[in-house]
Image (tube, grey):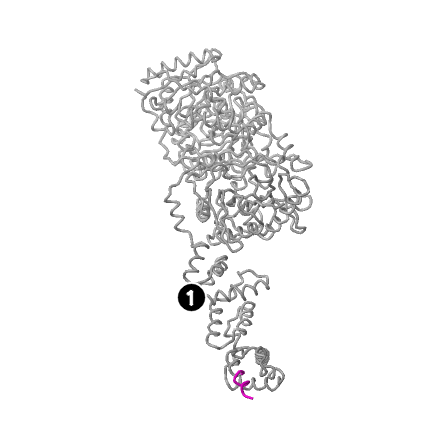
Amino acid sequence: MHYETVIGLEVHLQLNTKSKAFCGCSTDFGKPPNTQTCPVCLGFPGSLPVLNREALRYALKVAIALNCHISNKIKFDRKNYFYPDLPKAFQISQYNQPLSQNGWITIFIAGSEKRIRIRRVHLEEDTGKLFHEGETSLIDFNRSGIPLLEIVSEPDINSPEEAYEYLRTLKAILEYLDVSDCNMEEGSLRCDANISVREKGSERLGTKTEIKNMNSFKAVRAALEYERDRQIQLLENGGSIVQETRLYDATRNITESMRSKEEAHDYRYFPEPDLVPFEFDDTFIEGVRKELPELPETRKKRFIAEYNLSDYDASVMVNEKSLADYFERCVQLYNKPKIIANWLMGDTINYLKELGKEIEYLKTLKPEYLSGMLKMIDSGIISGKIAKMILMEMLSTGRSPEEIVRERSLEQISDDRELERVVNEVIEENPKIVNDYRNGKQNAIIALVGKIMAKTKGKANPQKVNEILRNRLKIV
Amino acid sequence: MELASLTVHKLRELLAKKDISPLDICKSLISSIRLKDSRINAIVYFDEDIIMARARDAEKKDRSNPLWGIPVFIKDNICVKDEPTTCCSKILKGFRPPYNATVIERLLDAGAILMGKTNMDEFAFGSSTETSCYGPTRNPWDLDRIPGGSSGGSAASVSADEAISALGSDTGGSIRQPASLCGVVGLKPTYGRVSRYGLIAFASSLDQIGPITKDVEDAAILLKIISGYDEMDSTSARLDVADYPNLIKRDIHGIRIGVPKEYFIEGMDPDVKNLMSDTIKKLEELGAICEEISLPHTEYAVSVYYLVATAEASSNLARFDGVQYGFRFEGAGSLIDMYKKTRGFGFGDEAKRRIILGTFALSSGYYDAYYLKALKVRTLIKKDFENAFGRYDAIITPTSPTPAFRLGEKIQDPLTMYLSDIFTISANLAGIPGISIPCGFTKDNLPVGLQILGRPFKEEEILRIAWNYEQATEWHKRTPPINKTISQ
């Protein structure tokens, strides 16, 4: 039987406002425990929340960027449950009137576009953090009250790969907006997934499970792959899916049951009486809209139009804001966008992957260095092959191309007499290959060029070598 | 002359003339408390050394401040920095807040001397001050009777001259009803008039802090100090504070007063009924026009109140879980066990009853039928008042259908107890201001209160009617027998 996978993702995003959602405490990450707290975020009796307007502005930015319909009315609700990291025993959240609804983003999957709808984006507050040390548990409330955005997708995602792409695209948008650190390992971006499978063509949704505890996009993909296969196998063997919450165990790459639907909380949502609902007009929303930076999709279209990049190249360039910014700085210094894109996509990214570094690593490679190196190729000072070597060195040491070329005398050999000498040597040393060529084996010339390049440590100007070699081989 | 028996405005005069010092007032209060409070039990925290030090310290402070040297007692659910604030609940025993409520900051800025904490029903859940973990407060007019509640300690202390003035809180009548039963003045301001920051919440959408005083002018003086917008409380109103003490002394000629027929119910004490008739006559003598009106949704007020208030309370009281502060049951086997035992031993019966009621009302499947419906009826009750205030400047009712009842009389019967707030609850649901002032005594010499309700943020209007009535009567000058016996 053929199955279709149905996935919906719930992303929690910490907003990087200066202060918390409902008090004036700082949101700085990594400070000593419980040093960024006050009666409000500690949930002390008598304290009251006051909405941080900046958090609302950040949330609006995201809602607009995700093409959501914005509600003009802001209302908060209490989500009631007991847990030691939740000091008031309720979380201030938004229930039936979220900030925004019915948005969408476009992802690229298998070479084509797919629209994933966003069900809602709402503002809430983060909880504290528990630490367990043997028999005792400790709580750090520094995180308590940090503004959190919940972004819920519709179940439009049909494979773990699509889920991965959705997250990647979403993260790109969020990074462009500069509203969050988007760091999954530090917990500033978290993701839970709902997944079910159904017979292909079936209208009815299958029973879903909720998967938690993934700390990277890859973990989300792996967890969903495992869970999809588990559900299909269960159905194939005549079993049925239980609606439950499951935890992903990254080391074993499996999901395990955490709690069933029956054990689920009744959160007893009701309107937060301490925060008065208020309305804002369209001009406020328009004001926020005007502040929005160029977003990945728009930027991509511009890259295609302005720099003549292919659809694919433009996609790669804009995916990470830092790479796109870098690309544009290079273009300003060296006006051959396609060549820059090629260098950035092929060798640079491959090398960084080899190093296991993120594109962030481009910090060591100043745009002037990359453009400088490309200009050296154009003016014949270095060969393309040498350039690759120089690039690796620039990336790992942060030194300029001029410095590297000078120090290691990597200038291309374009001097005719010098090249003729090497060509003659190679011809003399390889009579057999020379004979092969003369007997009509055209490809033999490649072997000879290779030997010449080896002798010059790759510095010989390849065009000139070709020219001289062909001329020499004509002479009997 | 006992300073402890004087009003704020009288003491201000004497202080201004330097006839007396803050220390004199505090000493007078301390001896009064020493004499009477073992029997009344109005005060739950008070430290003579600290008070004497504050009184001496006042000498160094700015004498031009409006409450310079004036002692104020605080209900035990209002946070005072580093002093016990327990809501008279075992679950908060030992809790000392790290901050002052906004009203406390304002009192201190005005030069007031904080005296200590007054008794109350646990978490303000009650109408008799019998559910306090420190034991019940007794009514100074009859020690076998309750002082009303939940601000029973504040009302009894002012009545018994153990306090010059006190702050209370009013969620369903908790200032007005005990003021009525103890023969003093109690004002519940408009919702949003006074900051709730630092008031340990019972029902956030209903709670207001207000003054309990010996006369109307004092209520106006204190209200002016504690009112006003507070950026720490999103529900506080961005409206200017009127100069209440100076606005109340105009006559009430031609003022239109509605008397809702729904407030003259079966089971109302005949003395209360008769005193109301006298009161209406007196107000008419003063030039007011009194007419019968209807507030048709009045009968639903108690039901709506006990859904809205308990729902909010169930959530507000969830934070008392033994994790950060207050009482924690030691030796629990697990987290859930710790929660259960902390709350099981920490809360009294009435607190548990209301938490369970509220939790139920908010439960999925019941929310629409109870909480949501209650909110809708609340809107209707509010509309009743809006309609009435379209034609009338104020509404008068008895504050309570009966005078003070006997200790233990209703404590086993929560429904009967809930009905003692029947006349005060609507004002909280509608968010409007209300004041209770003495309007006579029953045959058994128990005080009866008149409630005056007004338009939102028009406290000066109800204070004005109250002041005019007070000037024309002698009720506020009567003092409970216990004060005379002891001072003789």
Element assignment for label 1: helix
- Front position in the image: B331 or B39: B331
Q: Residue at x 37, y 33 (%)?
A: B241
Question: Which residue, as the protein is rendered here, is positioned at the far left?
Answer: B254
- Crowd class of label 1 (few under 14; some 14 to 19; many from 20; radius 10 Å): few
Position of residue A32 relative to residue A374, above or below, is above
Observer able to see residue A185? no
Question: Which residue, as the protein is rendered here, is positioned at the far bottom?
Answer: A476
Characterize the magenta stretch by its predominant secondary structure: helix
Quadrant position of the C terminus of chain A in the picture: bottom right
Q: Residue at x 57, y 19 (%)?
A: B411
Question: Which residue, as the protein is rendered here, is positioned at the far front?
Answer: A440
Residue A14 placed where, x, y %? 52, 48
Position of residue A371 relative to residue B309, above or below, is below
Position of residue B271 relative to residue A401, above or below, is above
Number of numbered discs: 1
- Front position in the image: B19 or A214: A214
Q: Which chain carries label 1?
A: A
Position of residue A225 relative to residue B131, above or below, is below
**Quarter of the view holding residue A431:** bottom right
- Front position in the image: A111 or B224: A111
Q: Is residue A115 magenta?
A: no
Which residues fall within the magenta stretch? A469-476
Observer able to see residue B177? yes
Quadrant position of the N terminus of chain A in the picture: top right
Residue B53 falls left or right of residue B396? right
Mark 1 belongs to which amino acid? Answer: Gln
Q: According to the image, label 1 marks what residue?
A: A332
Residue A409 placed where, x, y %? 54, 79
Residue B265 placed where, x, y %? 45, 14
Residue B271 placed where, x, y %? 45, 11
Residue A244 falls left or right of residue B142? right
